[in-house]
Image: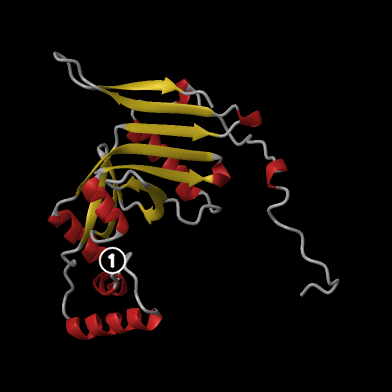
């Protein structure tokens, strides 16, 4: 309660003058792993070990539909390999429709306590049904039921409608095993660009990027490592 009778200070008022110098580390070419996947594995392991980072696998995924309008949300990464990163969602969600029309995406891991971020870009495709089924089977039963109950991204009347839908699918499945809904599954972002960002003092950050260079007529595609201006 504001006992003085005056309005509390506007939390946005000092935004332009907010300053913080980043001094947690550095990233040089000598420190970089040979591949983007090895570098991600190393940084991800450090993020997992840092108690200040609650969900190191939380990533922002950006998509755009056929109209070109960008969209962004946070999802949980559920698989990494040398090809790319996998997440799961409702195919009928906003991002599902956008990926159907424009199957490319960008993803961002932001680990502020470490003053680091990783940016990934590339084409997107659904994972196969077997991979989706394996992951779905590992989910808690409540999350399995929620995948059936939720009309993700669609308007609903109120919370009661969502709870009614959950009660219906809970009764339908009883104690039976629950298979993935046909409208639900995984997407893999096949990484063609991976940028590793380490904050540095005075905004002179380290930005090192792995980029898959297009193949010439008589050669194979190859990875290029380059430093970017901050």
Q: Residue furthest right?
A: 4
**Which residue is rendered at x = 33% and y = 64% of the image?**
153
What residue is pinned by disc 1? 139
Quarter holding the N terminus? bottom right
For this orientation, the residue located farthest to the front is 67
Residue at disc 1, secondary structure: loop
**Residue 33 seen from this side:** no
Q: Residue 176, percent across and down?
A: 16, 79
Q: Quadrant of the C terminus?
A: top right
Relative to 5, 112 lies left or right: left
x then y, percent, for residue 63: 34, 47
Tell which of 113 and 195 is nearer to you: 195
Q: Is residue 15 left or right of residue 218?
A: right
Near-viewer residue (40 or 156): 156
Please count the marks in the image: 1
- Relative placement, left or right, of 181 versus 18 is left
Q: Seen in the image, is 131 located left or right of residue 40?
A: left
Indicate whether 173 appears above or below 120: below
Residue 132 in which image quadrant: bottom left
Residue 50 % position (x, y): 52, 49
- Asked whether the viewer can see residue 56, the reply is yes
**Which quadrant of the view contains residue 106?**
top left
Residue at image point 29% right, 32% down: 192
Which corner quadrant of the image does residue 108 belong to?
top left
- Is residue 62 positioned above or below 222 on the image? below
Residue for point 60% across, 31% down: 200
Q: Position of residue 149 (x, y in %)?
A: 27, 75
At 37% from the left edge and 33% from the top edge, which residue is drawn? 194
Colour basis: secondary structure
Count residues near mark 1 (Cα–Cα under 10 Å), then give few for <14, some for 14-19, many for 20+. few
């Amino acid at each position: 309660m504001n006992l003085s009778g005056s309005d509390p200070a506007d939390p946005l008022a000092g935004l332009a003058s907010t300053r913080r110098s980043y001094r947690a580390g550095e990233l040089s070419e000598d420190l970089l792993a040979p591949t983007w996947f090895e570098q991600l594995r190393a940084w991800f392991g450090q993020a997992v070990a840092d108690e200040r980072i609650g969900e190191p696998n939380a990533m922002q995924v950006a998509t755009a539909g056929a109209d070109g309008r960008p969209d962004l949300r946070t999802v949980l990464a559920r698989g990494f390999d040398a090809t790319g990163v996998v997440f799961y969602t409702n195919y009928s969600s906003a991002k599902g429709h956008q990926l159907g029309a424009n199957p490319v995406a960008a993803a961002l891991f932001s680990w502020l306590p470490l003053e680091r971020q990783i940016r990934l870009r590339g084409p997107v495709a659904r994972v196969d049904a077997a991979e989706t089924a394996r992951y779905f089977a590992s989910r808690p039963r409540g999350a399995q039921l929620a995948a059936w109950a939720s009309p993700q991204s669609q308007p609903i009347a109120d919370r009661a409608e969502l709870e009614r839908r959950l009660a219906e699918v809970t009764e339908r499945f009883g104690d039976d095993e629950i298979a993935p809904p046909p409208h639900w599954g995984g997407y893999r972002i096949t990484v063609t660009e991976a940028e590793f960002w380490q904050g540095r003092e005075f905004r002179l950050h380290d930005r090192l990027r792995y980029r898959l260079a297009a193949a010439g007529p008589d050669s194979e595609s190859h990875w290029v490592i380059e430093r970017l201006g901050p």
